[in-house]
Image (cartoon, helix red, strand yellow):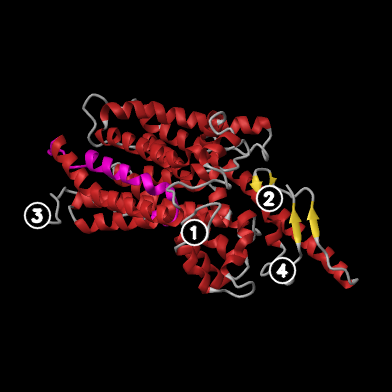
């Protein structure tokens, strides 16, 4: 049936998510991140006082984040994560535990959405592939910076909106119901107001219309449909860009107060691109693991990728669904990566790992599907060898998930140590300032070498003074931090 606001309907297979799969993905997330729940604030999280008037929660500050024309150095327009921060403060105050719980639950939700998306893209041929994809994402050692660093929940929220938009778009293509397109547009807007990188998502949605339309539709029909539904997305994106220009007279943003190209030169982004990508897909914190342990874990990850690649070559020959999934995930990877390219550098301790959180989803989803996809539409005479069909999925998954689990556990220890440093330094300075005040001396602390990182985990940098102000301490301690 066709008409205004209704597309030609495509027969969609039914899929009931397996409760045990979803529950286990959530349980694994909570189990691994449980040790970080009582972590203290790090780096920008120390600015939790932005939600207050210096002592109590002040909702009057919130409108300035929805239209942040006051920002001059770094023009971030991310009101949705900030609003969630205000809600968190209303419940938890300055206790970071509640914030960590929320971030961990958001990360678990990402894993569940990956589970749903992988199975839908693979035509529900084998629910295990979505299960492995979801586990790989929640266990990815590149993720802790986005999860444990509370402020970086914007990365998690953006990923949730991106995955939800893709699921809604597929539903719209399958059912022909316009309401799912509207859900996709709303997710796009929500993502834009969470983190700018989702601005390239319309390209992925456009490709979905080309790849996943009904098989009997011509290329011209597919293209016209894709263009038709891309126009509202383009208008929403144009409105967002127009608002950014109205706020700051520019459409891009600065990094650490630097222009994008200046930041890239300063941090040798292009020179280090190869090593940054290696750290992203083979994530093992060199600050935690010895060289031999690191090479062993990376070797296991490489072996899993190799097995997935071998099986993927066979799938490309026999599985039309896999042939559609590969270019779609390649586009998702490239378009998620492109907006951060000038700021993309990840060192061997996985510092800045948050930049590969969403691109990593595309990689791991593809790997899981390559390992586990059981094509119902495989051409006759091209069945896989018995070892490939029976052993490879289990061996590849065990290697990848096992190496990820060990690497993640070590990386999370680094975050515990980093947050402990912040807590210890804060307590020591407050105690010293209290002693001086007891003797009638008003202190001014000059930190000649402010701690910056612990094993790749950001700690203070320029935010030491925030740790010494209300609401984190009862009485402010004047501080001049030098790096």
Is residue 407 positioned above or below 30 on the image?
A: above
For the residues labelled 2 and 1, the Cα–Cα distance comes to: 28 Å
- Spot occupied by residue 210 in the image (x, y as percentages of width and height): 22, 39
Which portion, as a residue range, is magenta? 191-218
- Spot occupied by residue 169 in the image (x, y as percentages of width and height): 27, 50
Q: Nearer the viewer, mark 1 or mark 3?
A: 3
Mark 3 and mark 2 in contact (Cβ < 8 Å)?
no
Q: Residues within 10 Å of mark 2 (few under 14, many from 20)?
A: some
Q: Of the two numbered discs 1 and 3 on the same chain, state the one appearing first in sequence.
A: 3
Q: Of the two numbered discs 3 and 4 on the same chain, state the one appearing first in sequence.
A: 3
Q: What residue does disc 3 label?
A: 3
For the residues labelled 4 and 1, the Cα–Cα distance comes to: 28 Å
Q: Which mark is residue 473?
A: 4
Q: What residue does disc 1 label?
A: 105
Q: Nearer the viewer, mark 4 or mark 1?
A: 4
Q: What residue does disc 2 label?
A: 461
Point 60% across, 73% down: residue: 53
Point 28% across, 35% down: residue: 324
* Label 2: element kind: helix
Residue nearer the viewer, 440 or 283? 440
Mark 1 and mark 4 in contact (Cβ < 8 Å)?
no
């Amino acid at each position: 049936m066709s008409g205004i606001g209704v597309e030609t309907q495509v027969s969609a297979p039914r899929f009931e998510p397996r409760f045990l799969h979803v529950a286990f993905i959530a349980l694994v997330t909570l189990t691994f991140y449980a040790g970080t729940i009582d972590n203290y604030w790090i780096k920008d999280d120390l600015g939790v006082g932005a939600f207050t008037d210096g002592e109590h929660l002040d909702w009057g500050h919130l409108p300035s984040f929805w239209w942040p024309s006051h920002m001059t150095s770094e023009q971030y327009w991310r009101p949705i994560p900030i609003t969630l921060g205000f809600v968190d403060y209303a419940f938890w105050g300055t206790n970071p535990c509640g914030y960590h719980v929320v971030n961990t639950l958001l990360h678990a939700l990402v894993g569940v959405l990956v589970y749903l998306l992988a199975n839908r893209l693979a035509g529900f041929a084998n629910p295990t592939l979505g299960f492995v994809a979801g586990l790989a994402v929640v266990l990815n050692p590149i993720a802790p910076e986005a999860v444990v660093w509370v402020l970086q929940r914007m990365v998690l929220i953006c990923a949730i909106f991106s995955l939800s938009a893709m699921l809604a778009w597929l539903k719209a293509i399958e059912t022909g119901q316009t309401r799912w397109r509207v859900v996709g547009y709303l997710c796009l807007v929500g993502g834009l107001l969470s983190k700018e990188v989702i601005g390239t998502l319309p390209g992925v949605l456009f490709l979905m219309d080309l790849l996943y339309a009904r098989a009997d539709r011509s290329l011209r029909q597919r293209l016209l449909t894709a263009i038709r539904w891309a126009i509202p997305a383009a208008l929403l994106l144009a409105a967002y860009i127009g608002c950014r220009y109205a706020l700051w007279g520019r459409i891009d943003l600065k990094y650490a107060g630097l222009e994008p190209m200046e930041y890239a030169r300063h941090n040798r982004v292009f020179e280090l691109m190869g090593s940054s990508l290696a750290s992203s897909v083979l994530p093992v914190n060199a600050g935690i693991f010895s060289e031999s342990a690191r090479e062993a874990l990376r070797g296991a990850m490489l072996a899993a990728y190799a097995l997935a690649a071998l099986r993927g070559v066979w799938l490309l020959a026999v599985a039309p669904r896999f042939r559609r999934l590969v270019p779609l995930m390649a586009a998702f990877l490239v378009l998620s990566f492109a907006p951060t390219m000038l700021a993309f550098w990840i060192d061997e301790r996985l510092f800045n790992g948050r930049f590969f959180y969403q691109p990593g989803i595309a990689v791991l989803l593809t790997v899981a599907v390559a390992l586990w996809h059981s094509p119902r539409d495989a051409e006759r005479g091209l069945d896989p060898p018995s070892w490939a069909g029976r052993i490879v999925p289990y061996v590849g998954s065990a290697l990848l998930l096992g190496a990820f689990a060990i690497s993640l556990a070590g990386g999370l220890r680094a975050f515990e140590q980093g947050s402990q440093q912040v807590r210890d330094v804060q307590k020591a300075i407050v105690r010293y300032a209290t002693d001086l005040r007891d003797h009638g001396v008003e202190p001014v602390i000059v930190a000649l070498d402010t701690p910056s990182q612990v094993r790749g985990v950001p700690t203070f940098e320029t935010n030491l003074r925030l740790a010494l102000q209300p609401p984190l301490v009862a009485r402010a301690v004047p501080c001049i931090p030098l790096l």
